[in-house]
Amino acid sequence: MDKGRFGVPAAVRDWAIALGVAALLLGTGLSGEHPGAGPDVLGYALLTAGGLALAARRRAPLAVLAVTGLCAVGYQAAGFDVLAVSYLVAVYGAVRAGHRALTVAASVTLLVVLPLTALVLHDGPAGEALAQARHVLEIAWLIAAFAAGEALRQAERRADEAERTREETARRRADEERLHIARELHDSLTHQISIIKVQAEVAVHVARRRGEQVPEALLAIQEAGREATRELRATLEALRDDDTTPPRGLDHIPELVEQASRAGLDATLTIEGERSDVPAAVGRTAYRIVQESLTNIARHASAATASVRIDYRAGSVVVQVDDDGKATPDTVPTPGLGLLGMRERVTALGGLLRAQPRGEHGFTVQAELPVEHTS
């Protein structure tokens, strides 16, 4: 059940308002001049019914608007000169619920019907009849009720939008943090585990080729590397990476090439052109492209050599990684997380990425990264 600021259910509040308005109308009717020699039971019933109808203003605001309006016409026809408080509250509720046009139409209709009713049923001068109609429903009070309902409706809408914005911001921040963790796992931990696994497999292969007994510790390292790779890949499938703030850049690419060489790959680095000021985002992306490319070569390509080339051009930096692995022109690259992550990084900078088999065998990854208008 909906509760307000003080924990009072909405239905209880509505009934309290309805009973209060009914008591106010009935008290005003009893304290005024009676329309006849004795009390008019129908008039008092309409005064009470108009107030009690407000208990349903949240569930059926338009129906309550119609009922309170008809009650106002009825007790005016019975001779009661009482301000239509119940109708004003109904106007407030209907406008708050968003029924502005229908509320305006109903109010204009009531402003026309009340004077006509007074003119038809009142025995005195026409001026007194019109004054009585104005006392039942004054335009100033009607405008105030309409404005109050509209003001609260706008305030509630802004509050809902602010709450929704806060929820979306919190959810986006949580997603960004999760994606940041996933990208760092993919970009750094996967690289290191792949090197450990490849070195362990090379050591096992060499030992068996020489006819030597493979140490149990080495076999355990090999199996642990395989299992860690599988589990990390499964984790990365659940955590999609999309962050652009890793800490490394162009200056750290020689370390990647050196690590690949220590892992048994004949890797070389060539730098061409004159380096100018390169935005941090471009440097980070270049580093991740080289890292991911060397990791894929060690893991999938069965290559003996790899070459990394960085070409500083006017307005751009071109990063290219080639290998002499088993890929052929007929090979269809598998769109894994690595290639997808590289493409997203390059596209985010407004660059171009080409990843495809080269020549008779081997694979090439080339990224052209613009250095202008990049933050």
Image (tube, rainbow, N blue to C red):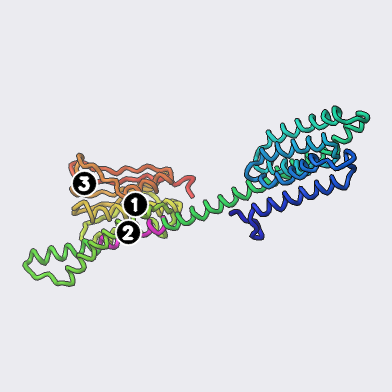
* Residue type, mark 3 in image: Gly
Q: Amino acid at mark 1?
A: Ile
Residue located beneath label 3 in the image = 362
Query: Which amino acid is tagged 2?
Result: Pro
In front: mark 2 or mark 1?
1
Q: Is residue 189 magenta?
A: yes
Residue extending furthest right?
A: 125
As drawn, the label of residue 132 is none
Where is residue 152 shown, x and y percent of the image? 69, 47
Give residue 304's position: percent from left, percent from top. Answer: 18, 54
**Residue 52 visible in this rendered orientation of the protein:** yes
- Provide the secondary structure element on which disc 3 rests: loop
Residue under numbered circle 1? 289
Residue 178, placed above or below residue 58: below
Q: Which residue is mark 2?
A: 254
Residue at x-position 62% and y-position 44%: 59
Circle 3 Cα neighbour tier, 10 Å, few/some/many (<14 / 14–19 / ≥20): many
- Residue at image coords 66%, 38%: 63
Which stretch did the figure color magenta? 179-195
Q: Residue furthest left?
A: 211
**Residue 322's x, y, as percent?**
26, 48
Q: CA distance from mark 2 to mark 3?
A: 22 Å
- Can the viewer see residue 147 in this picture? no
Res 175 → quadrant: bottom left
